[in-house]
Amino acid sequence: MTGKIFAFMLIFLSSAAAAQPLVLDTPQGKLIGQPSASNEAISVYRSIPYALPPVGDMRWKPAQPAPAWSGERIATDFSPDCIQSPYAEGSFFYRPARPASEDCLYLNVWTKAQADEKRPVMVWIHGGALTRGSGAIPTYDGTNLANKDVVVVTLNYRLGVFGFMAHPELSEESAQNSAGNYGLLDQIQALHWVQENITAFGGDPDNVTVFGESAGAWSVHLLTASPLASGLFHKAIAESGARLDTRVELKQETSAGVSAEAAGLALAQAVGATSLAELRAIPAHQLLSASEAARFRTDGIVDGWVIPEQPYAMFAAGRQNKVPVLLGFNSEEGTTLGAGGNLPANDDAYISRIKGIYGDLSNEFLSVYPAEDIRKSTLDAFRDSTFGWNMVTWANLTNTVDEQAWLYFFTRRPPGPNADALGAYHAAEIAYVFDNVHTLAAATEQDYQLADTMSDFWVSFARTGRPESAGQPTWQAWTDGQRNYMLLGDTVAAETDLLPTHWPLHDRIMAARRR
């Protein structure tokens, strides 16, 4: 055999070995996975059913465990996304649509561990306003996190009208007289799946961290509030999202809006359905279109069961699940969310608008967000009211269960078109958290270094409850007396007292809304 032929045979044999499927025996049955395309040391198992398909009479019912199977299940491709409409072309968050179905309750696992190694588990809950998204988005690829010796799980959960629809008949058929939080119940069922199955993937069911961004962070917050999720996870990471402002309630109107049941009745009337049976018979895409036309609101609902009471009241009284938390937000959250549009024409128009909204608090508001730079003040106020106050307040209220909180402030402007105008936009940190900055338009060495550091911090927190990264400053825990945080940007620095004049103002604004 000549040298060239021998070399060719070695390449052929090594390629064939790399292409060999991976067979894993799990409590549900055998899975056929495959090595990660970017790192053959990582095994990937996709489209694993964690719940029965929520179709037919199962539409708007709590998720039920998926049964075991016989034989081998192919787990090499992602499942369809849950039913949704894609972001409009031209939107910053637009991506090509993927197949979508009501039969969508599947999850995906990345691991390089052997069974029974008991590595920390990180369960990612995607964002998208509870109306869009999936566990299959390339930025969420778990390969690089799994290479840092954790087991990574991403999942789908019901969205929009399919995940958050309430109706009096749904409450009546529920043993708990509850309705509306089906997307959250999906997430809870996925966490039950982790408890029952993750050991086969080398994960530790006694060391599970839930993490998510935007609506995924809302979900993490509501899971921390829900008694149904107690004991299913042990640490929580929330990036730019919590629900400490007043939430919609199942049966009564609040400052957040009409009751969830009333909203469901209005949608039923809009689609001409006179009963729950008729609502369940409407084809999925028709129901989706009708709900969007009616501007049906999607949100976690205070239903007395999944979410027993207003989250702020629960956290203030120490009735949330007892877990340490890592929390934070970005410096220019609003640039991709429309907050910089429709600005007042001049200083006087800005001041008039603020006085009309904030009344007695307007002078304090204008001292924090002055008229001298209307765009910056508008963006900063949006960031702080929508994200910053929620994250800082959650950090403060963690002491009610005697747990530690760790706060970050992300300021890195990812390179790419309009980088200066976009700044550290909403969701900008995700590629760094997953160590996937290769998905950015023009990542630099600085971006790769920051991604390595941030993913180290996140993995360390999942492993031990303390965010650490070799060679980086010591991240001190947040307390109300020592308001420590980590600056994550062009530099990584341990700082104190983030935006100290902002939070007392928003405390007063939110207290007035609660009243």
Image: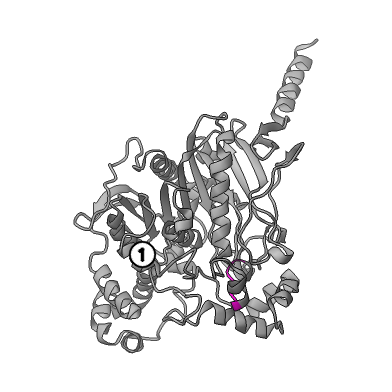
| Residue 448 point in image, percent of width and height | 46, 43
Name the foreground residue: 219 vs 301.
301
Residue at horizontal 66 percent and vertical 40 percent from the top: 28
Task: Note whether 404 is above or below 168 in the view shown.
Answer: above
| Residue 506 point in image, percent of width and height | 30, 73
Residue sitting at the far top: 1
Q: Which color scheme does this rendered protein use?
A: one colour
Q: Left or right: 479 with respect to 52?
A: left
Name the foreground residue: 202 vs 386.
202
Q: Can residue 294 be seen at all in this image of the molecule?
A: no
Main SS, magenta residues: loop
Q: On the image, numbered disc 1 is attached to which residue? A: 314
Residue sitting at the far right: 1
Q: Quadrant of the N terminus?
A: top right
Residue at horizontal 79 percent and vertical 16 percent from the top: 5
Q: Quadrant of the C terminus?
A: bottom left
**What segment carries the magenta color?**
163-168
**Amino acid type of disc 1?**
Met
